[in-house]
Image (cartoon, rainbow, N blue to C red):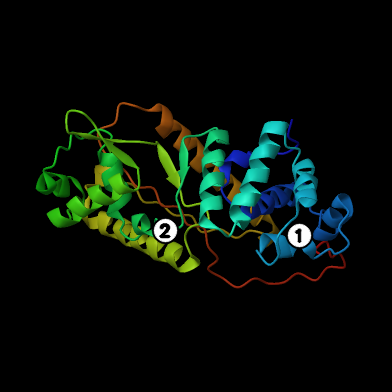
Amino acid sequence: MHEVPFSIYDYTDFREALSAYYAIKKERNPRFSHRALARKLGFKSSGFFSMVVKGKTSISAETIIRFANFMQLGSHEATYFELLVRYNQAQKEDVKELLHEKLLSYRTTSATILKEDQHAFFREWYHPVIREILDYYPYRGDHEALARMVQPAIAPQEAKQSIELLERLGLIIKNKDGSFSRTDRHITTGTGLTSQETKSFARKMLMLASDALDRAPADERTASWLTMSIAKEHYPRLLDEIRSFRKRLREFSETNTDTDTVYQLNMQFFPCAKTVRRTSGDDNDA
């Protein structure tokens, strides 16, 4: 049983998993540090963990076992973690494809890890929207009607190309009656997107949210904000709260089958003031 609330199956990048687990441990014990972790795992350098999570070095089979023990993973979880490391560190596409298939068999959710060449899905904000629309709308080839279902409306040609892309990626499937259905409940980018692509997609979703303030009726949308001062050391804990909330919404979506519309939720948590460094004799970081 885990000492901290953590699920390895929530991650498609082993570095993010390690970083998240360390953040939880640090939040529970502020004196826990990279140096303490190095001692616990038998690493000679206290900077090794930092190099791993930043992607500056790979880890060996022996180190995989050490990290699995550190995160208190069960045998099934440890196997998933090992596959995840091998997948993230693989260089050849055929090897990544094989490991990708094995990873899917170990996932406890219905998420799909997108291949690295499937960046097109995240180039336009309406691709995931159309995919969700197909959960309840009986689309059978009327691109104009589908384009009008999207808010704000898109061009019929864009709707047509989106359907072709979704089908090509295996994210939707054509039924015998000519309609389309989603193949999985949720997807995740894994390590496929670059930082620039991720930021570009996030900006498009923020612009969509801004447009909704004028486009959507007040009783069909909500916008709220909270400005607060915190100790920067508490950031990991608040980030974990956000992840927990998002996970609960995802679980609700997975069990809710009576759908009739599509909503977008954006969450941002960012600094808007400079940090005043406190003077202290304690240095718990490696």
| Location of residue 122 (image quadrant) | bottom left
- Residue indicated by mark 1: 49
- Label 1 environment density (alpha carbons within 10 Å; few <14, some 14–19, many ≥20): many
> At 47% across and 52% down in the image, what residue appears?
189
When the figure is inspected, residue 141 is found, relative to residue 210, above or below; the finding is above
Horizontal placement of 166 versus 105: left or right?
Answer: left
Q: Of 238 and 259, which appears nearest the observer?
A: 259
> At 57% across and 42% down in the image, what residue appears?
10
Q: Of 241 and 259, which appears nearest the observer?
A: 259
The image position of residue 221, as x and y in percent, is 30, 46
When the figure is inspected, residue 198 is found, relative to residue 136, above or below; the finding is below
Horizontal placement of 176 versus 192: left or right?
Answer: left
The image position of residue 30, as x and y in percent, is 79, 53
Residue 129 image label = none
| Location of residue 260 (image quadrant) | top left
- Residue indicated by mark 2: 117
Residue 240 makes an appearance in the image: yes
Q: Of 34 and 106, which appears nearest the observer?
A: 106
Q: Amino acid at mark 2?
A: Asp
- Label 2 environment density (alpha carbons within 10 Å; few <14, some 14–19, many ≥20): few
Q: Nearer the viewer, mark 2 or mark 1?
A: 2
When the figure is inspected, residue 258 is found, relative to residue 243, above or below; the finding is above
Quarter of the image containing the C terminus?
Answer: bottom right
Of labels 2 and 1, earlier in sequence is 1
